[in-house]
Image (tube, grey):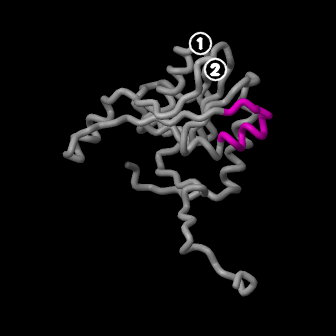
Amino acid sequence: MPTRREVLTWEDVDKLIDHLIPQFEHEFEAMVLITRGGITPGGMLAEALQISDIFTAAVDFPAEIENEKQREKNRLLAWPKFLQFPDEDLVRGRRTLVVDDVWGSGRTITAVKNRITAQGGVAYTCVLHFNPYRSLFGTVRPDYYAAITDAYIVYPWEISRGTENILLRPSDF
């Protein structure tokens, strides 16, 4: 993990979205948002691009090993387990934008893209941040990305919002 952390504001995210929009060379007929990181930027892009067919994909790379170090090594070798994925009929023959917040190793978004392609769809990948230093795919990059980073990014939707952060006003009593 990189030691440098970058905490973004909503204004930072708006700028990243604004940087992405002019890059798109195609109109997309559908969008697949990778849970959970892709939901917020995907929703923002869907609104801006007026895409109404929006689906989700949840992917896990299970590794059933007790030893933490060995588990992480085995996770890199594990086949993806799709916990949630759109039916083949929903992506077949359609230009589909696959959205996540960050391309770290690239495994999740690549697995989703490959499954859409196997189902007869045409998939394009899109992230807010691309980390080429962690990518497991050599020179392969996302089709669209707003920024390159080597930092651990903390997005505004990841900041703790538990009840301990709620301020009560006198009118709440």
Residue at 43%, 33% in the rendered image: 135
Identify residue type, mark 2: Val
Q: Which residue is mark 1?
A: 120
Q: Is residue 139 left or right of residue 31?
A: left
The image position of residue 137, as x and y in percent, is 42, 26
Q: Which residues are magenta?
A: 42-54
> How busy is the neighbourhood of tag 2: few (under 14 within 10 Å), some, or many (20 plus)?
many
Q: Quadrant of residue 7 in the image?
A: bottom right
* Residue plotted at (68% across, 20% down): 95
Name the residue rendered at 72%, 30% in the picture: 53
- Amino acid carrying mark 1 in the image: Gly
Taking 97 as reference, is 33 above or below it?
below
Residue drawn at x 52%, y 51% as measured from the top left: 153
Q: Which residue is mark 2?
A: 91
Q: Is residue 11 magenta?
A: no
SS under mark 1: loop
